Image (spheres, rainbow, N blue to C red):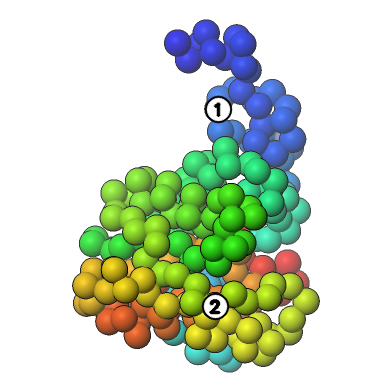
Amino acid sequence: MQAALHLVYPPQCLSCGGLVDSDFALCPDCWRDTPFITGLVCDSCGTPLPGEDNAVVHCDDCLTLARPWAQGRAALLYRDRGRDLTLSLKHGDRTDLAPPAARWLHRAAQPILRPGMIVAPVPLHWLRLFRRRYNQSALLSAALARLSGLPHIPDLLIRSRRTPTQDGRDRDGRFRNVTGAIRAHPRHAPRLHGAEILLIDDVMTSGATLAAATEACLAAGATRVSVAVLARVAKDA
Ligand SMILES: [Zn+2]
Ligand SMILES: [Zn+2]
């Protein structure tokens, strides 16, 4: 069946559309231009750091700015094809990118996954959801939960108010913009109490949105929150 399908629809590179050997793959050129994060990373945000793997270290950003979450990982750097793929998933109707992106995310998040964690996406406001028709973070979190065998609650968190875009704001502005904008869905309050949560988002820039989402989980009684993102905007990246 798969072979017959491939005659009609030969597998294409996720990024450039060139022909590749298998479904959900990148061609060698796009693979080379996709900045997958490997080796030693900041334990809070997943930024790559110089040094030997297996140490617990933190980047300058996370040392300066205390993160309310316990651990964090990222699959890609937000540049080159890493940026293109992330933007295609967000704005380009490329929902087909979610399963392969979730596999990259799953690999990156492996060291911070813990049994019994509840996986949940960072929420979009319903108006934005209505315009975009899907929440890219929820597509990622659903696929990641399936891969890791962890429970998924897509509406664990909700936006309690609409926030203007984070684009073009400095770090303090980004934090001010989202403070108090996210809360736990009252329906899920019993599940959150005493739970460990893994929050999923597509991009981490300042970490302001993830901090607001983490605080919403902790306020609702979660004991520990970790974060995983598809792409990390890193300084000098
Ligand atoms: Zn390609
Ligand atoms: Zn960091």
Residue at 29% x, 78% y is 222
Q: Is residue 107 left or right of residue 26?
A: left
Residue at 59% x, 34% y is 25
Q: Secondary structure at mark 2?
A: loop
**Whole-percent x and y of residue 72?**
46, 70
Residue on which disc 2 sits: 161
Viewer-closest of 79 and 144: 144
Whether residue 230 appears in this view of the structure is: no
Query: How much space separates mark 1 and mark 2, taking CA atoms?
Result: 40 Å
Residue at 58% x, 81% y is 178
Type of amino acid at the residue the image marks with label 2: Arg
**Whole-percent x and y of residue 62?**
55, 83
Label of residue 23 in the image: 1
**Whole-percent x and y of residue 151?**
28, 55
Residue at 63% x, 41% y is 94
Label of residue 162 in the image: none
Q: Quadrant of the C terminus?
A: bottom right
First in residue order: circle 1 vs circle 2: 1
Whether residue 186 appears in this view of the structure is: yes
